Image (cartoon, rainbow, N blue to C red):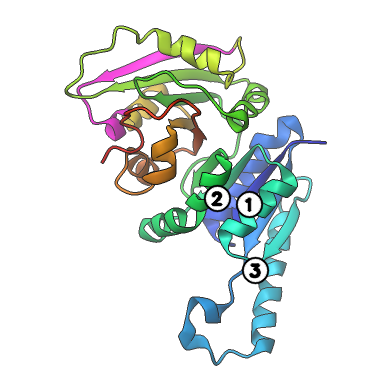
Amino acid sequence: MNPSIVVLTNLSAAADKAARYAAVLGAPLHAQVTLLHLYHDPVMLAPELAIVTAAQTDRNYAESAAGVRRLAQRLPDTPEVTVSVRPMPEAVAEAIQQHQPLLLAMGLSPEHDFLDELLHNQLLPVLRATHQPVLLVPEAASASALPRRVLLALDAEPFSLDAAGKNLGPLLAAWQAAYTVTHIVLNDQAPPPRSPLHVADVRASGLLPPDAPLWLYQETDVAPAAGILQALADTQADLLVLIARPRSFLGQLFHHSVTAEVLRRSPVPVLLVPAAAPDVPDWMPAMS
């Protein structure tokens, strides 16, 4: 059975970009891409539209399904298409159970307020249950080829991965990319003497192939989000990996967080990988 990637799509330009990038990332492993479109009855979204007839609702559903199929036909290997009328947490959980994907993918729209609300209120319940890695693709990102330079942003504590994180290893190995580990030192911290061990921590986690080129980049006296964005520019990375701690990943991931700030300003796709380490104080992504 080939590995799979599930892409949440809403027929927007951002979702189109995410679907195309997911197909590119999964191609070396011949990963099956599944497009999951969440159709919601306009009456449920806006009660003032209650005058909409059942026939019109059926037409809206058919048009949405046809739009997803057209998107699938533009992608290589014609992905599987699922149109669900269930609430997002239920639909995504069902797709995860059925396809056992390496990761979920979705587009990042410039409408950040709506995005924050959507992710926090609908996607986070799924993540609490699955701890699934999530790929977020900004609509403006250049995401048409396999990543060649990947930046991993870590906090100051050791980490390990759960089974879903470790399952990403073959996918990242297939990209044959070079990797840089960045650690952002907070203004009130001294540079940690164990910084060189961050490279060893990453190798021990099993996320990267053992022979992947790996370097260390460290910023001092800079705000975490700004430091990560500066590291992206300095290393010319075309993909960012954020290791998210359990507490912050499940609680404050998209609200008042370093991750939220990075997502709003990142020029490249961001892969969120939940850590399985004990819940310890951390700055990323829970710090406001």
Rounded to the nearest angstrom, the CA distance separating label 1 from label 3 is 13 Å
Mark drawn on residue 85: 3
* Residue 67 sits in quarter: bottom right
Q: Where is residue 60 drawn, in percent x and y?
A: 64, 78
Rounded to the nearest angstrom, the CA distance separating label 2 from label 3 is 16 Å
> Which amino acid does the dot numbered 1 rest on?
Ala
- SS at badge 3: loop
> Which amino acid does the dot numbered 2 rest on?
Val
Q: Are marks 1 and 3 in contact (CB under 8 Å)?
A: no
Q: Are marks 2 and 3 in contact (CB under 8 Å)?
A: no
**Residue bearing mark 2:** 126
Q: Which residues are magenta?
A: 212-227
Q: Is residue 108 visible?
A: yes
* Residue 53 sits in quarter: bottom right
Q: Is residue 9 visible?
A: no
Of the pair 283 and 7, the residue shown nearer to us: 283
